[in-house]
């Protein structure tokens, strides 16, 4: 039950980037412009737009995709699964926190980029209903997104895996970064972990349920910076498609849903999203120069007798 009347997905409405396009900077500008114009049209027609973002929206802010074996953070995929997993955390918490330290350093000093701001502006303008993110870095919230579902958890809190006590992350992580002291639960003294989803852990139930509702309600899903490889968050666009939504994908790499997308843009989200948002944002206020500095001749208008009537 979506509550929206959906149009048929006519083949005439489908414009798609060619798979053979080179992924970086090699797409002819005309093609990207046409795709962006089509995406703007779809955004203008939609009544319930939901964005789904992944690591690619934060790489312009300097944050590597720590869940990817290709991120350069890992020698092998097995290393990644061993350290960044709930198993690794439980059995080798010091190794886990040693791994976390440089990542925390990068994330805590990162700033939202134009892609984050564009989504927040679209929401403020009433064009975007929600952002579902796989990122833990808090950049959407800092950019101003309010209707936000962080389905892989977030770095705002730390949690005790034994008694589930939650604490604000900042003081504990500040102390860890300066003194190396691993945070412990103030109730049961168990080692606490950032409230993020590690490999082998369940996704947060409430955020995921709300994200699924958003996906079912959407008549347009905008995927930005995700290759949709990590399930089940990567399955949300499929839920949207099953309920009749259109799909825009902005991502450098192929995804398994490319064949079902209405528009695919293989370009930098930090360049594309501000262009998608621009037509929907309120116009910048015009700043008029003070009246006494008005040079009538410079405005291309010759003074005439009719203009000199102010002194009366
Ligand atoms: Zn505890």
Image (cartoon, rainbow, N blue to C red):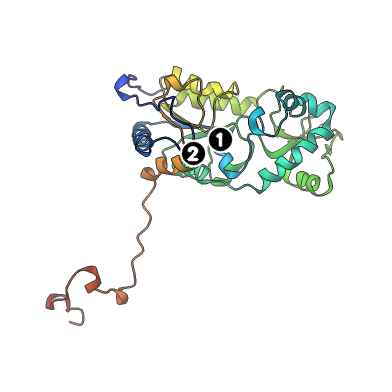
Camera-nearest residue between 273 and 216:
273
Q: Is residue 12 above or below residue 50?
A: above
Image spot of residue 219 (x, y percent)? 41, 26
- The answer to whether 308 appears left or right of 153 in the picture is left
Q: Specify whether residue 1 is in view.
A: no
Instruction: Give the residue drawn at x 63%, y 47%.
Output: 110
Q: How many marks?
A: 2
Q: Which mark is residue 32?
A: none
Quarter location, residue 163: top right
Q: Is mark 1 within 8 Å of ligand 1?
A: no
Instruction: Give the residue drawn at x 45%, y 40%.
Output: 273
- The answer to whether 292 appears left or right of 159 in the picture is left
Instruction: Give the residue drawn at x 49%, y 19%.
Output: 238
- The answer to whether 199 appears left or right of 50 in the picture is right
Question: Which residue in the protein does label 2 denote?
Answer: 269
Question: Which residue in the protein does label 1 denote?
Answer: 56
């Amino acid at each position: 039950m979506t509550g929206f009347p959906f149009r048929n997905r006519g083949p005439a409405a489908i414009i798609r980037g060619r798979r053979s396009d080179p992924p970086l900077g090699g797409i002819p500008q005309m093609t990207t412009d046409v795709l962006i114009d089509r995406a703007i049209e779809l955004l203008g027609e939609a009544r319930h737009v939901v964005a789904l973002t992944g690591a690619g929206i934060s790489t312009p802010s300097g944050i590597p995709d720590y869940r990817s074996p290709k991120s350069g953070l890992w020698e092998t995929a097995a290393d990644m699964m061993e350290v960044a997993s709930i198993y690794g955390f439980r059995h080798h918490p010091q190794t886990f926190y040693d791994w976390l330290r440089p990542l925390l350093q990068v994330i805590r000093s990162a700033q939202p980029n134009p892609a984050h701001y564009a989504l927040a502006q679209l929401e403020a303008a009433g064009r975007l209903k929600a952002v579902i993110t796989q990122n833990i870095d808090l950049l959407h919230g800092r950019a101003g997104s309010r209707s936000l579902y962080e389905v892989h958890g977030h770095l705002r809190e730390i949690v005790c895996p034994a008694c589930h006590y939650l604490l604000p992350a900042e003081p504990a992580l500040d102390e860890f970064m300066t003194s190396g002291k691993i945070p412990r639960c103030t109730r049961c003294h168990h080692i606490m972990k950032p409230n993020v989803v590690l490999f082998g852990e369940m996704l947060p139930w409430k955020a995921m349920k709300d994200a699924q509702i958003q996906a079912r309600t959407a008549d347009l899903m905008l995927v930005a910076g995700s290759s949709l490889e990590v399930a089940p968050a990567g399955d949300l666009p499929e839920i949207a498609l099953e309920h009749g939504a259109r799909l825009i994908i902005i991502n450098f790499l192929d995804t398994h849903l490319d064949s079902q997308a209405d528009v695919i843009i293989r370009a930098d989200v930090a360049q594309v999203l501000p262009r998608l948002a621009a037509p929907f944002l309120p116009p910048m206020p015009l700043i008029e120069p003070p009246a006494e500095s008005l040079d009538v001749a410079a405005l291309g208008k010759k003074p005439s007798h009719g203009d000199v009537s102010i002194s009366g």
